[in-house]
Amino acid sequence: MAVAIGGSSAFLTPVGQQSNTIVMGPAGYQFGDYFRLGFPLVIVIVTVSIPLIMWFWPLGIKDE
């Protein structure tokens, strides 16, 4: 599940998502704009997804 979430959260470059590449030209975005706005978004996704993954799919450690 972590690989699926990580693969779908490629916001740091315009080639990570198809919609980023389509919007780059008409909107006048530069390559650095994606990194500047995508980096905080990736940090939020990692911070939220890791605890949620561990909660929904624990590593098999059972309480005794």
Image: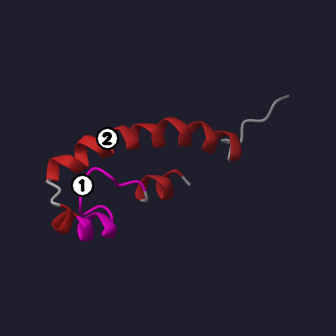
User: Residue at the location (49% across, 54% down)?
Assistant: 5
Q: Secondary structure at mark 2?
A: helix
Judged from this view, the residue extending furthest toward the top is: 64
**Quadrant of res 22:** bottom left
Q: Secondary structure at mark 1?
A: loop
User: Residue at the location (39% across, 43% down)?
Assistant: 42
Q: Quadrant of the C terminus?
A: top right
Residue 13: which numbered mark, if any?
1
| Residues shaded magenta | 9-23
**Percent coordinates x, y for residue 29 in the rendering:** 17, 56
Q: Name which residue type carries label 2.
A: Phe
Q: Check the image and report above or below for 60 versus 20.
A: above
Q: Quadrant of the N terminus?
A: bottom right
Judged from this view, the residue extending furthest toward the front is: 27
Tag 2 and tag 1, C-beta contact below 8 Å:
no
- Mark 2 is surrounded, within 10 Å at the Cα level, by few (under 14), some (14 to 19) or many (20 or more) other residues, namely some
**Percent coordinates x, y for residue 4 in the rendering:** 49, 58
**Quadrant of res 23:** bottom left
Residue 39: which numbered mark, if any?
2
C-alpha gap between disc 2 and disc 1: 10 Å
